[in-house]
Amino acid sequence: MHAVASVSYARLRSAGRPVHVFWTSVAVFLALNVLENLVHYSIGRRRGDDAPQQQGWWPTPHDAAAIAAVMLVFAGLQGVITWALLG
């Protein structure tokens, strides 16, 4: 995995475009979507009549890891697309 990330980063740098565009896009995406994902998680957790009523809106460690993994994938895609179009 690390080799893939370093190869991808090397390609970003060697293309002659500013890499900060990629990192800024990833950071903004992550910052704006944390709260939104928590709200959607909370709504989905309470949906349905047969769902057990659970207190709180913070995800379990397993669910938090899954949310973080999905967010990182989409943040990377957002960064690459923004970098490719605007860089």
Image: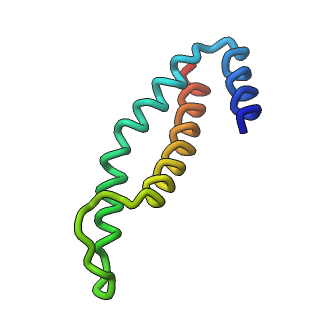
- Residue drawn at the location 68% of the way across and 24% of the way down: 9
Residue 3 falls left or right of residue 73: right
- Residue drawn at the location 47% of the way across and 29% of the way down: 25
Q: Can you give x and y, in whole percent of width and height, for residue 47 in the image?
A: 30, 76
Q: Can you give x and y, in whole percent of width and height, for residue 67 in the image?
A: 46, 53
* Residue 23, above or below 68: above
Q: Quadrant of the C terminus?
A: top right
Q: Can you give x and y, in whole percent of width and height, for residue 70 in the image?
A: 52, 51
- Residue drawn at the location 26% of the way across and 78% of the way down: 53
Report how many numbered discs are placed on residues in the image: 0
Q: Can you give x and y, in whole percent of width and height, for residue 12 in the image?
A: 67, 21
- The answer to which of 58 and 80 lies nearer the viewer is 58
- Tell me where residue 46 sits by quadrant: bottom left
Image coloring type? rainbow
- The answer to which of 16 and 34 lies nearer the viewer is 34
Residue 79 falls left or right of residue 42: right
- Tell me where residue 43 sits by quadrant: bottom left
Residue 80 falls left or right of residue 14: left
- Tell me where residue 85 sits by quadrant: top right
* Residue 18, above or below 1: above
* Residue 49, above or below 63: below
In this view, the residue farthest toward the bottom is 50
Q: Quadrant of the N terminus?
A: top right
In this view, the residue farthest toward the front is 61
- Residue drawn at the location 46% of the way across and 24% of the way down: 24
